[in-house]
Image (cartoon, helix red, strand yellow):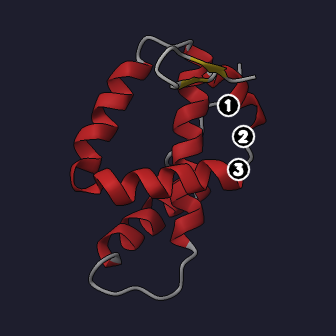
Amino acid sequence: MPSFGSKGEITVNLRTVAKNLKTEDLAYILDSWINTNGSSAFKTGKELGQMFRETHRTLQGLLVNMCLGILAGISEQEYTDPRNQRAIQTAKEITRQVTEGELPLQPFI
C-alpha cells in the first residue's frame, strides 16, 4: 500500500511493485524509459550492469539470460529500416549463437 509523505509525495515499496509486475508492464516501463533517456542507452546499460555486479550471482545469470531472451524476441522482427537495421542484425546474430550453442545460456544453479 502506498504511503504519503508530508509534501504529498507517494512512497511505494518497489519490491512489492516488482513482485506484481506483469511482463507487459515491464515492457511498457522499459519502452517509456528508453523513449525518454535513449540517447545514452549503452552508457546507462553499462552502469546498470556495474550495479548488478553486487547482486546475487544466480540473479546475474538470470539477468544475462533475460537480456539474451529480449534480443531473441526482437530478432524475430521481419521488417527493418535504417533506425533499427543494425540492432535487428545484431540481435539475429546473437540469437543464432545462442541457438547453435556457441553462446550458451547460464544454467540455473
Q: Secondary structure at mark 1?
A: helix
- Image quarter of the N terminus: top right
Q: Secondary structure at mark 3?
A: helix
10 Å crowding of disc 2: few (<14), some (14-19), many (20+): few
Q: Amino acid at mark 2?
A: Leu
Tag 2 near tag 1, CB within 8 Å: yes
Residue at point 51% right, 25% down? 9
The numbered disc on residue 18 is: 1
Q: Nearer the viewer, mark 2 or mark 3?
A: 2
Q: Is residue 92 above or below residue 43?
A: below
10 Å crowding of disc 1: few (<14), some (14-19), many (20+): few
In-front residue for pair 102/25: 25
The numbered disc on residue 23 is: 3
Measuring from the top left, give residue 19's x and y in whole percent.
Answer: 75, 29
Q: Earlier in the sequence, mark 3 or mark 1?
A: 1
Q: CA distance from mark 3 to mark 1?
A: 10 Å
- Image quarter of the C terminus: top right
Q: Amino acid at mark 1?
A: Ala
Where is residue 106, by image quadrant? top right
Residue at point 29% right, 55% down? 38
In-front residue for pair 58/27: 27
Q: Is residue 64 above or below residue 87?
A: above
Where is residue 50, by image quadrant? top left
Q: Which residue is mark 2?
A: 21
Q: Secondary structure at mark 2?
A: loop
Tag 3 near tag 1, CB within 8 Å: no
Considering every residue shown, the one lying at the far front of the view is: 7
Residue 101 visible in the displayed image = no
Q: Is residue 82 above or below residue 3?
A: below
Q: Amino acid at mark 3?
A: Thr
